[in-house]
Amino acid sequence: MAPILNYEKRHEPVAPRYKFRSRLLFNLVLGVVVIAAGLAIGMAGYQYFAGMGAVDAFLNSAMILSGMGPIGELTSDGAKIFAGLYAIFCGLLIFAVAGLILAPVLHRVLHRFHVEDSEE
């Protein structure tokens, strides 16, 4: 009987340094883009729900995104709900971006420690 899943064993050498650097740079740029998009979402939300100007919205968004907490006092219920949801979003976003940036490094480390299985 044939196996249900046929995994082909491939043991490739570690990627050259230039390829590793390009992957790391790509993931770093992608992480910066994701953070900038998260910041833009926060600014738009603070401007819409809290009626803040662009500078105050940027300050509050950046402070929440960095984990420091909000600066201005929020008066409306909509603004408070947005701030809470945005804080949860930012907490998850930081972990996602950290994983995205560290993925090539962890992949390279695991690839280096890969031990070829011996067939018995």
Image (cartoon, helix red, strand yellow):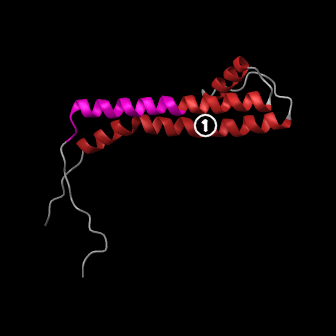
Q: How busy is the neighbourhood of tag 1: few (under 14 within 10 Å), some, or many (20 plus)?
A: some
Q: Where 40 falls versus 59 (above or below)?
A: below
The residue located at (56%, 28%) in the rendering is 36
Magenta residue check for 29: yes
Q: Is residue 10 above or below residue 57?
A: below
Q: Position of residue 28 (x, y in %)?
A: 42, 30
Depth check, front residue: 112 or 54: 54
Q: Is residue 4 left or right of residue 72?
A: left
Q: Quadrant of residue 22?
A: top left
**Which residue reaches farthest top?**
55
The part of the chain drawn in magenta is 14-34
Residue 16, position as x, y percentages in the image: 20, 34
Residue 40 quadrant: top right
Quick one: quadrant of the C terminus?
A: bottom left
Q: Name the side, left or right, on which 50 lies relative to 116.
A: right
Residue under numbered circle 1: 91
Residue type, mark 1 in image? Gly
Magenta span main SS = helix
Q: Which residue appears at 73% of the width and 37% of the height?
A: 84
Q: Position of residue 69 (x, y in %)?
A: 69, 27
Q: Residue drawn at (45%, 33%), measured in percent from left and top?
A: 30
Which residue lies at the image location 49% right of the left edge and 36% below the top edge?
Answer: 97
* Quarter of the image where the N terminus is located: bottom left
Query: Residue 56: where, in percent of width, then height?
Result: 73, 19
Is disc 1 placed on a helix, strand or loop?
Answer: helix
